[in-house]
């Protein structure tokens, strides 16, 4: 007879405890243990062993025990990546879909995760199986008609049972499998409700096994919790090969697909889309989308040249410095690290003599972007000084440089790409670090390059 046992599993590291503890003994996280009911010695365990290799047999393979192979004798696959019609998705994946990979896509409700995956299923040149545990086949068909239904090999299935899902996928033999979402799946071998730690861990492990044994790439959509992290155990992100975060603000139409983890490419890439009535549109030139159109020059605004991955783009930094009416001045930053803003304010007070101690300071990266590139420091400083002095800067000027604690302007990477992007968009002047000028011939560019070494020189050149 099956024995039922209660255990407590950590949602962060997956450690199992026999009793509840306020703090996980393995990873040290507080309040991360969740109760689970496990069944041992049941017939389900034997049934699981019998069905684990069913999809492998359907694909014409035999179950064999793994044996070590010398790295020089491993046969490589000539068709490692399959590019899609979506260039932005290809960018964040590192060039295309890798055979046998499992990709996890997370994001807030309504941001467009299902729309992105359905567009992939409708535009992919091969056979795609789209499995949804949240919508019926009729609902998916309605959304597909809105997105522009095409005559391709796209198959739909509404299913939450993991075993049946894998059996049908093995029978159909698709080129790509899309699962929406991992929190709705349930395995009959786990005595827990869908979305629990045990179910998510078990379903993710089985999907990984399916992808590796059948060489079919799997895209999995995941929900996020109130903290913005993907719901379920942290082990989920370790199991998959690629983790993509789909971000967006409801006040803006553009969406950002950011790479969090990628075993087959760079983690610094991002793709930009624009949400329209007929789905997501790729944005090939994000600079024109992120730059605010203004009728006149206003104080507190500066343009900076940043690089995300291998993509250069220009964004707008907005600052507002006003007299504080409270005893403790406010410091607020949107899309920028608040601690770095405090550091830049301290540099301006110490090195340049500007007094921000009695002023409220608000900083915003226009367009809802979150930027961590240190090269935008010079634009932040320029925007702060412009707002403090209430003097507008010319709209044809941009910046690219990092500010150090002693007030020096440090060099940044890929300065040539930043200069070329500013030149292409019609800017007439760009301020860079003096230490970035090695190997750069200003005569090769139509834009004026102004090298600086200290913050004081930036203020003197702009406002005096």
Image (cartoon, rainbow, N blue to C red):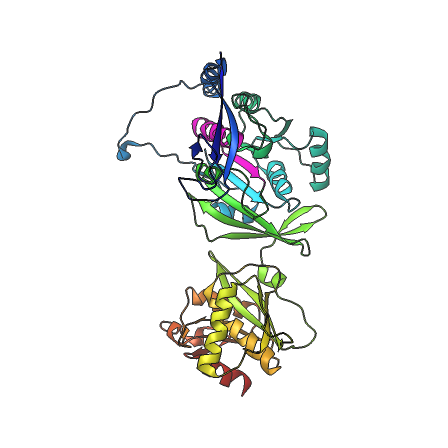
Residue sitting farthest toward the top: 1
User: Compared to 388, does 189 lie above or below?
Assistant: above
Q: Residue at the location (54% across, 47% down)?
A: 245
User: Compared to 111, does 14 lie above or below?
Assistant: above
Task: Identify which residue, 259 or 109, lies in the foreground.
Answer: 109
Q: Is residue 204 magenta?
A: yes
Quadrant of res 320: bottom right
Q: Please provide percent x and percent y for residue 307.
A: 48, 61
Please provide the residue range marked out in magenta.
199-223
Q: Is residue 227 visible?
A: yes
Task: Identify which residue, 148 or 240, lies in the foreground.
Answer: 240
Judge left or right: residue 396 versus residue 264. Answer: right
Q: Number of callouts in the render?
A: 0
Task: Identify which residue, 461 or 419, lies in the foreground.
Answer: 461
Q: Is residue 85 visible?
A: no
Q: Is residue 208 magenta?
A: yes
Q: Please provide percent x and percent y for residue 448.
A: 49, 78
Q: Residue at the location (61% across, 42% down)?
A: 113
Predominant secondary structure, magenta span: helix
Residue sitting farthest toward the bottom: 464
Q: Please provide percent x and percent y for residue 105.
A: 55, 42
Q: Residue at the location (73% across, 40% down)?
A: 146
Q: Please provide percent x and percent y for residue 273.
A: 61, 51
């Amino acid at each position: 007879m099956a024995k039922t046992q209660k255990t407590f599993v950590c949602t962060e590291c997956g450690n199992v405890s026999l009793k509840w503890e306020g703090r996980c003994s393995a990873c040290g996280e507080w309040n991360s243990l969740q109760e689970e009911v496990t069944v041992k010695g049941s017939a389900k365990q034997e049934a699981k062993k019998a069905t684990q290799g069913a999809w492998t047999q359907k694909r014409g393979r035999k179950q064999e025990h793994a044996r070590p192979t010398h790295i020089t004798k491993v046969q490589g696959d000539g068709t490692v990546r399959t590019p899609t019609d979506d260039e932005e998705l290809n960018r964040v994946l590192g060039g295309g879909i890798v055979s046998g990979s499992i990709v996890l896509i997370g994001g807030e409700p309504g941001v467009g995760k299902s729309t992105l995956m359905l567009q992939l299923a409708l535009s992919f040149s091969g056979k795609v199986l789209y499995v949804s545990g949240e919508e019926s086949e009729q609902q998916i068909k309605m959304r597909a008609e809105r997105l522009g239904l095409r005559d391709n090999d796209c198959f739909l299935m509404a299913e939450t049972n993991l075993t049946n899902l894998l059996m049908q996928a093995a029978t159909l033999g698709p080129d790509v499998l899309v699962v929406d979402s991992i929190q709705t799946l349930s395995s009959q071998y786990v005595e827990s409700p869908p979305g629990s730690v045990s179910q998510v861990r078990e379903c993710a492990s089985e999907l990984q096994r399916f992808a590796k044994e059948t060489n079919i790439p799997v895209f999995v959509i995941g929900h996020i919790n109130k903290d913005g992290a993907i719901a379920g155990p942290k082990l989920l992100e370790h199991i998959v090969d690629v983790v993509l975060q789909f971000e967006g603000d409801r006040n803006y139409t553009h969406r950002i697909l950011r790479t969090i983890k990628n075993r087959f490419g760079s983690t610094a890439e991002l793709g930009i889309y624009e949400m329209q009535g007929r789905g997501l549109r790729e944005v090939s030139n994000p600079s024109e989308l992120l730059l605010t159109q203004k009728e006149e020059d206003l104080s507190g605004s500066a343009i900076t040249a940043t690089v995300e991955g291998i993509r250069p783009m220009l964004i707008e930094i907005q600052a507002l410095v006003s007299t504080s009416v409270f005893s403790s001045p406010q410091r607020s930053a949107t899309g920028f690290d608040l601690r770095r803003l405090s550091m830049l304010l301290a540099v301006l007070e110490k090195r340049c003599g500007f007094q921000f101690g009695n002023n409220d300071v608000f900083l915003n990266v226009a367009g809802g972007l979150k930027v961590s590139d240190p090269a935008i420091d010079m634009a932040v400083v320029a925007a702060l000084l412009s707002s403090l002095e209430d003097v507008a800067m010319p709209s044809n000027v941009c910046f690219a440089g990092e500010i150090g604690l002693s007030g020096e302007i440090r060099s940044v990477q890929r300065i040539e790409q930043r200069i070329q992007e500013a030149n292409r968009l019609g800017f007439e002047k760009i301020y860079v670090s003096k230490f970035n000028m090695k190997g750069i011939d200003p005569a090769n560019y139509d834009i004026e390059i102004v090298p600086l070494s200290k913050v004081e020189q930036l203020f003197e050149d702009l406002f005096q």
